Amino acid sequence: MKQPTITTQLHRRDCLKLAAGSVTASLASTVFAKPALTSEKTSAFKMGKAEHCIFLWLGGGMAQIDTFDPKPLGDAKTKPSRPGSYYASIDTAVNGVQVTEHLSQTARLMDRLTVLRTVNHRVVDEHAFATNLVHTGRMISGSTVYPSIGSIVAHEKGAVDPSVPAYMLIGIPNVSRGPGFLGAKSGFIYLTDTATGPAGFTRPADVDETRAAARKSLLEPLQSRVPSESTLADYRAVQEEALRLAGPDFMKNFDLQRESSSLRQRYGGEFGQRCLLARRLVEAGVRFIEVSHNLGFVNGTGWDTHNDGQLNQHLLIQELDTALAALIADLEQRKLLDKTLIVVATEFGRPAAFDSGGGRGHQGTAFSMVLAGGGLNHCGAYGTTDDDSKLPVDHPVSIPDFHATIHASLGIDPRRELLDGSRPVPITDDGVPIAKLFG
């Protein structure tokens, strides 16, 4: 049987990025510097009761000013161009909260979600560093590989149902999503094709339960010689998990044909089908599912909307709108929305000004993330940015605060310490949950 792919793969490019990160470790002390603004965050907070998290990843940098934090219209065609939103804005189900016209379906469900409009960091020039920061809550530093938020959740909570993995990734794997110093047991199982599911978990037709059990018994004498608390022991545990999951009981979760055609159509295209699969995995008991929206061909650039990528950005936004609204409504109909926190995340935002090609550059000083469901006290939008959506006016949210809010919603104390060998490492870098959402 083909060896299933579990946990992260450390590619040569990742190694180079980690090595380069040691040079920039001195920047870490400034990455989370917060504006001197008032905030409702407090060290006293309630723990949430969500059981699952679906983490929708918009790789490339979603333009908050064109989606969830609209401002007055700009014009990319005038000379010089006029800063502002690219699209008109519309009202939502929450009085006083507007979004872009291309989020019309989500707008009707705005009372089930909160846009965090004042997320901020200082990593803007390099996608990989910013992606790692948003996934791990920390800058790359020396030889330490920090665990991703998905791996921390898997480590702390395990799967809701022990018959499935705790952490799954629907997208391309890399070190930013991985377990870091927590080890392979806190890693993920991934798939890139919703139609076939994870590679390697389907047995060949001639290998039935009896033959699979016989093959497993052949490994046992070798496994018994592996020292406990070793890297090999960690790998052995992962191998045993792979063998346990292999077969039809696990793989049936990936058969979207079990869903009605009307529901599949409601979710939309490939990204929507990934979100539908995420809902099925929630029902099966998976704790944390990351879903990548990486369909760059829709507008030529994906969410990295430099130059001409801006022209068809609305197609990406509409695709997100369709899938997100369907996911919220579907979970609510199945009485799973309060148990499932939906997160929409991206590595940074976009400035109000247009670049020379008519697109937008990178901006980390203020951008938007979205939280939906999860039993939180939603308010449509949290925090206010200035007229250009460049800086927080009130209630700034750091990346550690963003992580702390997710952890707390899942009943994980963000102040708890993990162990990197014998060195204690707090789950977040002094992150504080947003108390208003737990009121």
Image: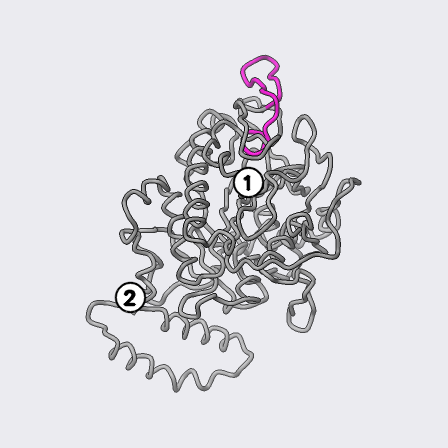
Residue 234 percent across, percent down from the top left: 50, 74
Residue farthest to the top, as pictured = 79
Q: CA distance from mark 2 to mark 1?
A: 39 Å
- Which region is colored magenta? 64-84
- Helix, strand or loop under label 2: helix
Relative vertical location of residue 155 with respect to residue 171 in this rendering, above or below: below
Nearer to the camera, 181 or 158 = 158
Magenta stretch holds residue 114:
no
Judge left or right: residue 22 versus residue 292. Answer: right
Across and down, in percent, residue 224 comes to 44, 86
**Residue 318 position by quadrant:** top left
**Label 1: which residue?**
111
| Label 2 vs 1, first from the N-terminus | 1
Q: Secondary structure at mark 1?
A: helix
Q: Nearer the viewer, residue 48 or 75?
A: 48
Give amino acid for label 2.
Pro
Q: Which mark is residue 248?
A: 2
Q: Is residue 180 left or right of residue 337?
A: right
Left or right for 401, reference 132: right
Q: Position of residue 380 (x, y in %)?
A: 59, 39
- Looking at the image, which residue sits at the far right? 36
